[in-house]
Every structure is written in C-alpha cells, then in structure tokens.
Image (cartoon, rainbow, N blue to C red):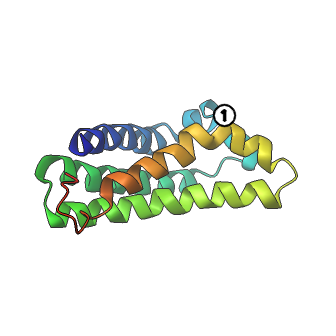
Amino acid sequence: MKRFLAGLLALLAAANGLVMLLAGRWWYGAVPGVSETGPFNPHFVEDIGAAFLTVAIGFAWLAARGSAAGRGAALAGAAFLGLHGLIHIAGAFTDPHGLADLERDFAGVVVPALVALWIAWPQSSRGESNA
C-alpha cells in the first residue's frame, strides 16, 4: 500500500514540478492563494518546481525498489514537504489571514506532507513492513 501511495505521490509531485518549470506563470495564477503571496517571480517558481521534481524522484525510487536507499531518497523529499507544511502552519499564527490561508491550503500542502512522512518513515523495530 505504501509503495502504491509513494508512486501516486511521485506522479503528483512530478506533475506539479513540471508545470512549475514549463508553465510557471500559468501555475502561479491557477493555484489558489499563490498570487496573493506577491508578484510572480519566475526564478523562484522554477526553484520550487525543481524541489518538487526532487520529491518525485525520491518517491518514485521508493515505489519502484522499496530499498533502504529509496527510503532515504523519499525521506529527503518528505523533509521538504514537511518543512513546507510547517511554514504554512506557522503562517497561521503569524499572519493576519493565516488561519484562512491554512484552511485553504491544508488539503494540498499539510495533508500531502503528513502522508509523505508516513510513507517514507523507516520500518518499525517490531518487524512490520512499511514498503
């Protein structure tokens, strides 16, 4: 199940990253709330698109192999998604519109981060299979 979800997360992250790299201006206007963060900066959008492609590679590796190296690559991707989610959560407490922003972004930012961390987290010591 986790390997299937890793593959699905890889596909979604790859699609997002590619659109950010190839159609950044369109992505910037299409994703709710993004245009409210300031003026379009193509370099910034492309940098984040590259980060999402890196996430995709890590989760694709885990989905394909289920190896320790794949898990490490997925953990690195999950770390990015987790930190991204924490930034959105912190904004809920530091920005006047933060709670409304978090409500809008929760399903698309925080939930994927939690799922990614659950998928990539190393196997428990009780011998349960995570892959």
Give the camera-side residue of 55 and 19. Answer: 55
Percent x, y for residue 38?
75, 50
- Residue visible at 50% across and 59% down in the picture: 82
Q: Which residue shows up at 14% across the image and 47% down it?
A: 64
- What residue sits right under mark 1 in the picture? 32
Between 108 and 24, the one nearer to me in the picture: 108
Q: Is residue 103 above or below residue 89?
A: above
| Element assignment for label 1 | loop
Question: What residue type is disc 1 on?
Answer: Pro
70 on left or right of 38: left
User: What residue sits 20% from the left and 57% below the top?
Assistant: 128
91 left or right of 76 in image: right
Q: How far across and how far down the image is residue 26, in percent?
A: 57, 32
Above or below: residue 25 compared with residue 88: above
The residue nearer to you, when weighing 105 against 46, is 105
Q: Which residue sits at x=67%, y=47%?
A: 40
